[in-house]
Image: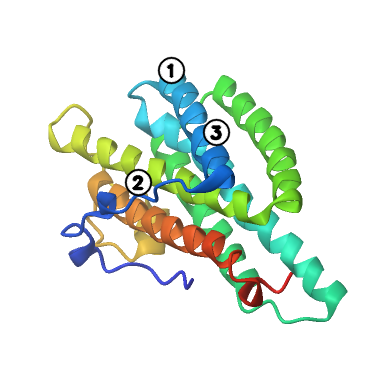
Amino acid sequence: MSQQQPDNSTVACEDPLAKHRTPKGFSDQVAFRLTRLLRFFADSFFAQRYGHRAVVLETVAGVPGMVGGMIRHMRSLRRLEDDREWIHTLLAEADNERMHLMTFVKIAQPNWFERMIILLAQGIFFTAFFLLYVISGRTAHRLVGYFEEEAVYSYTQYLAEIDNGKLENVPAPQIAIDYWKLPADARLREVVIAVRADEAEHRDVNHGFADSFDRPEEVRQ
């Protein structure tokens, strides 16, 4: 998956919510139900504080790509086998999610309590996802695919709150303008559209990676 920045003139016309992967089999059910459980906690804690929600969730979202890339990197070294571009794709995804975080930190300005939650959530999730990936790479990628489905949905809600005037459409931070090559006068709405497009791409890529575990010649395990 390349991380070229999206053409935001066309992204707004697309419907990233059009895709949902129906769970099939035990592995998919585990990933889907875990995603729904974590969604419940996120909804309960953050409600409609979308900027703060994005800060906490994006710090977790940057973990899977780095963990998956690291594990596949070490596997490639150990087995003297090509990774078929998995490593580059996963590390690019992790860096993209990191830029989402850097952007929303500028927008939401998290307080000390939220920063403590970030530290705790990242530590727990890193350990849990590492173990999951070692045990079942397929389930791990499916989990990320479902996470990204929820992320697309959340950013669509965020966008709706901006469009109906419930949230201020503040100027986009400079880091977002530079990263996504937005107009100099871009605002929060354009940032949310760009981030949502990234999440939709990550969704499709990770569901595709999970599917490839059913075709062992593509996974090279």
Q: Residue at x 15, y 59 (%)?
A: 13
Q: Is residue 146 found left or right of 217 in the rendered image?
A: left
Q: Measured from the top left, where is residue 53 in percent x and y?
A: 43, 31
Q: Say which element carries label 1.
A: helix
In the displayed structure, would residue 180 be above or below residue 49? below
Kind of residue at badge 2: Val
Tell me the quarter of the picture where residue 158 sits.
Answer: top left
Task: Say left or right for 56 vs 163.
Answer: right
Instruction: Write the residue at 19% across / 66% down.
Output: 10
167, 78: nearer the viewer = 78
**Foreground: 47 or 113?**
47
In the rendered image, residue 126, in percent from the top left (x then y), is placed at 70, 42
Mark 3 or mark 1: name the one nearer the start of the chain: 3
- Residue that label 2 marks: 152
Earlier residue among tags 1 and 2: 1
Q: Determine the CA span between mark 3 and mark 2.
A: 17 Å
Q: Percent from the top left, x then y, of residue 160?
A: 19, 37
Determine whether 122 is above or below 37 in the image: below
The residue wearing badge 1 is 44
Residue on which the image places disc 3: 34
Q: Position of residue 186 (x, y in %)?
A: 24, 54
